[in-house]
Amino acid sequence: MTRRSFIRGTGGYLPEKVLTNEDLSTMLDTSDEWIRERTGIQKRHVAADGELTSDIATAAARQALDAAGMTAQDIDLIVLATTTPDQTFPATATAVQAKLGCGPSAAFDVQAVCSGFLFGLATADSMLKQGLFNRALVIGAETFTRILDWSDRGTAVLFGDGGGAVVIEAVEWDGAADAGIITHHIRTDGTKSDLLYVDGGVSSTGTIGHVRMEGNRVFKHAVTNISSAIQAVLDETGLTAEDIDWFVPHQANKRILDGVARKIGIPEEKVVITVDQHANTSAASIPLALNHAVRSGRAKKGDLILSEAMGGGFSWGASLFRL
């Protein structure tokens, strides 16, 4: 018997305010056609004044708890992936913990930008398997529009705000090896940090800063690195692309999603795409897409899910799990 983690519920939340491509065309030298052709994005959601990352994370977490049939008191670990915390400290996960009304538990943030949810999932999964905790909330939540330079067409059109969450639980398991959360492959290459970064920070400028990106170079490295991470998890498990029921990628750019799917041989009908409806929500995009796939009835219990992500840092990774 070994301990294995299982996903018990998913949740998501998007702010009410919607910013369409047409709206952006009144602010920038751009158009709906230009944005759709290059990114596949139609609209994005923007957090209301006074709406914090912890508020978004809490809403997503509550929905995941409801789906799992659990309460906040059942959770003994919260791992929150975010690049846009409420404060420098304490961790935004502690605010979520307080808002949910959890009992004694551990709560902390992880920061791997768009790869953050997969880094958080791998972290929580490892801690549950070790027996340190029993049930965890893994959340990705962002108010990413607050670090955008709205005069920069190359980045302003790409991002939105939102949050997604999963509840995972560890149990003693002696069944199939490909049940529950199966494996992860996460990597970072700090020498490429200049490809995607924020030009500010506490110890450097004392300011928040704005997102800066070299789009063409990011695209090139994204397809290569993501494909290698996916191949690593498939090689480890002996599974193939044909075994995958659903591909739930980080929703960065439809061209990247199409490129990765083609490279690893996953047909278009198995790719879950939500980037058109909420743009790139960084650490929130994978759990938002997963929640959409579950609640729309596409992804069902027992389905094999492959997820991938690429983010600033330069970070990337892949996870394989069965619902």
Image (cartoon, rainbow, N blue to C red):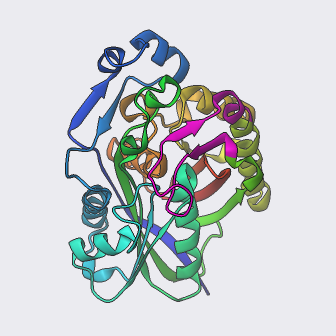
Report x, y in % for residue 191: 77, 51
Which residue sits at x=58%, y=62%? 119
Q: Is residue 304 visible?
A: no
In the rendered image, residue 213 lying in the magenta stretch gets the answer yes
Which residue sits at x=62%, y=65%? 182
Say which of 167 and 250 sits in front: 250
Which residue sits at x=59%, y=33%? 257
Q: Magenta region: which residues? A: 194-220
Residue ranking furthest to the front: 205
Say which of 196 and 78 sits in front: 196
Which residue sits at x=48%, y=12%? 34
Report x, y in % for residue 240: 73, 47
Rendered position, 40 above or below 272: above
Q: Is residue 136 visible?
A: yes
In which image quadrant can residue 176 be found? bottom right
In which image quadrant can residue 195 be found? top right
